Amino acid sequence: MTARTRIKVCGMKDGAEANGLVAMGIDALGFIFVAASPRNIEPDKAREIIASLPPFVDAVGVFVDQELDVVNDIVRYCGLSMVQLHGNESPQYCEAVKCRVVKTFSLRPDTEPSETNPFYDPYLGIVSGFLVDTYHEKLAGGTGQVFDWEQLKKSRPAGPLILAGGLGPDNIGEAIRQVRPFAVDVNSGVEIAPGVKDIAKAEWLVATVREADRLFCA
């Protein structure tokens, strides 16, 4: 689909960090609106950071089973260009969100291909992409754990694939070689602490992605 892997960094809480990431070529920034998350951000702060971003950088709101009206209010107030849904949101719910939607699916170690594709298929033509993450019994995302990418050889959504789950500069090149995703979603792999980004790691990650694109995606 593309010769350039897009990069999203999630869990933003600081404006200077956000603009530093954009300056190095990050395509999208994620803002987590989940009270239980250590990376949760208040709408007022997200709005302030998003207002400082240059054009052509996506601001992505992350939600888990929030009331639809709440999501749409935050979309409008913060100026989100996209939302990423990590809960049990239905295709009808996704269709009613007032911006583009990425729907997240978590793969269990024992997930078989015949079980997986029906998860994706009802969302085709409704959402803009599919994020595939590592399954965790208690967490809806941000596990910092890698799943077996071999599963995606037989259990791949028909739409754009965003790969998540324990990605960082040390494994991102191999992830791109194996999976060839449309985009990668990184969080704890470029952090010093939850919500505090390590700019040196982020620069290393971007350089590794670009080298992997040159080798495997041209």
Image (tube, rainbow, N blue to C red):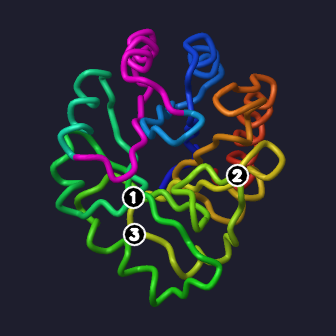
Q: Which residue has dot 2 on it?
A: 144
Q: Position of residue 85 (x, y in %)?
A: 38, 51
**Identity of the residue drawn at 34% across and 53% down:** 65
What is the magenta range?
Answer: 40-67
Q: Quadrant of residue 77?
A: top left
- Answer above or below: position of 30 versus 140: above
Residue at the disc numbered 1: 87
Q: Earlier in the sequence, mark 3 or mark 2?
A: 2
The residue identified by callout 3 is 158
Taking the magenta stretch, the answer to whether it contains residue 62 is: yes
Q: Are marks 2 and 1 in contact (CB under 8 Å)?
A: no
Does label 3 or label 1 sit earlier along the sequence? 1
What amino acid is at disc 2? Answer: Gly
Which class describes the residues within 10 Å of circle 1: few (<14), some (14-19), or many (20+)? some
- First along the sequence among labels 2 and 1: 1
Q: CA distance from mark 3 to mark 2?
A: 25 Å
Tell me residue 115's x, y (percent): 45, 86
- Helix, strand or loop for disc 3: loop
Rendered location of residue 22, percent (x, y): 57, 20
Instruction: Report how many numbered discs are placed on residues in the image.
Output: 3
Residue placed most toward the observer, 181 or 216: 181
Tag 1 secondary structure: loop
Does the stretch in magenta take in 187? no
